[in-house]
Amino acid sequence: MLQILAIILFFNFTVVFSTGNPGSKSSCIYKAVGEKVIIQMDKEKLQAESHVTWTHNQKRVYVQRGMKVTVKELDIDHTGSLILENIRLDQSGEYMGEVFNSNGKFLKKNESQLCVQEPVAEPTVIFKCEENRVTLTCNGMNHSEVVVSWIKNGKNESIMANAVLHVNSSDLKAGDKFSCTVRNMISVKSAKDVQPLCSDSGQHPMNDNKEKEVKSDKGNKKDDVSEKTFLFGLDFWWMLMVLTGGGTFLLILLLICIVCLCRCCKQSEKLAKEEQEFRLISLMPDQPDCQYNQETASQRPSKSQRPLPPIPGPRRPPSDAPSYI
């Protein structure tokens, strides 16, 4: 049964990617974006007088008549084969080349269909638990020209070639893993395995990575609850941070107060000293009087230098006084 299904899928795949032009004489040449493509004309070397014409979807992209080139959107080699460097998606289509001699006689012709595609991106599988079933979706397809196949438990069981897969809960066993593969004609990539577990089995939906994360989260939550300590009804670490911050603030404030107090004490001592000096100056005599007394004293002659007083003469009675004999 699986072999028949694979044959049907392959047939559909070839039909999807076959050329869309009925009556085309060659199969499609599949190339990836950015590659170099050479559409062969012949292995024989062109004659110097040959006429060469290449068209892309009936539009001339190269025309050469003898040694003269009149149209050159693309280039050819010495055999007349068309060269496409770093191809793009819009360069897909039908290419036709013709060669004539100098007299216009037909010599050879080539028709080719070029299909340019982008490589598929790496897909991912997500799932959603619904009533009595699980819906898996293959995401990450960057364009529509891809074929999706599903893999169960590492086996190529192409259950259905669709981006969405529905699995009944009754068919889902513990440990079942699913993955999807996307492919086109130039590339193929597969998603990582996913293990869908839903509430029908007593568990919540999760894949392998999510399951580990949830388990670790649950263990961390239990450890957090058991290891938490409280102080004054609040978490110990929060209280420790608050107390540390408050203590730091008080210490800074105390240092500021001490500095201000020291400055005030120094200023008070300075004022007291200035007041004492002012009082002493007020009690001292005026400086000019002292200097005058000193100068006067210095100008006075000493006792040794003073002239002696005159010797008094004998005292005589006044002439007017009466004389007594």
Image (cartoon, rainbow, N blue to C red):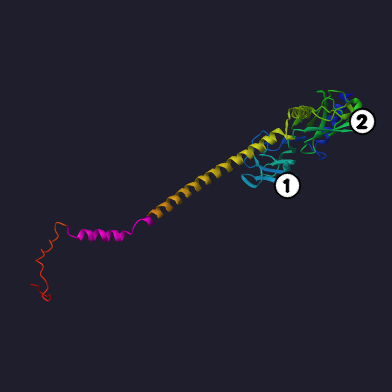
Amino acid beneath label 2:
Asn
Classify residue 60 as left or right of residue 3: left
- The residues colored magenta run 281-302
Along the line of sight, which residue is nearer the eye, 28 or 202?
Answer: 202
* Element carrying mark 2: loop
Magenta-span inclusion, residue 290: yes
Check disc 1 and report the residue beneath it: 59
Disc 1: CA contacts within 10 A as few (<14), some (14-19) or many (>=20): few
Q: Residue furthest bottom?
A: 320
Q: Horizontal and vertical percent for residue 312? A: 11, 65
Q: Is residue 255 above or below residue 197?
A: below
Classify residue 324 as left or right of residue 72: left
Question: Of helix, strand and loop, which mostly describes the magenta segment?
Answer: helix
Q: Is residue 299 above or below residue 261?
A: below
Quarter of the image with the N terminus in it: top right
Whether residue 4 can be seen here: yes
Classify residue 67 as left or right of residue 217: left
Amino acid beneath label 1:
Lys
Q: CA distance from mark 1 to mark 2?
A: 57 Å
| Quarter of the image where one finds residue 115 | top right
Check disc 2 and report the residue beneath it: 132
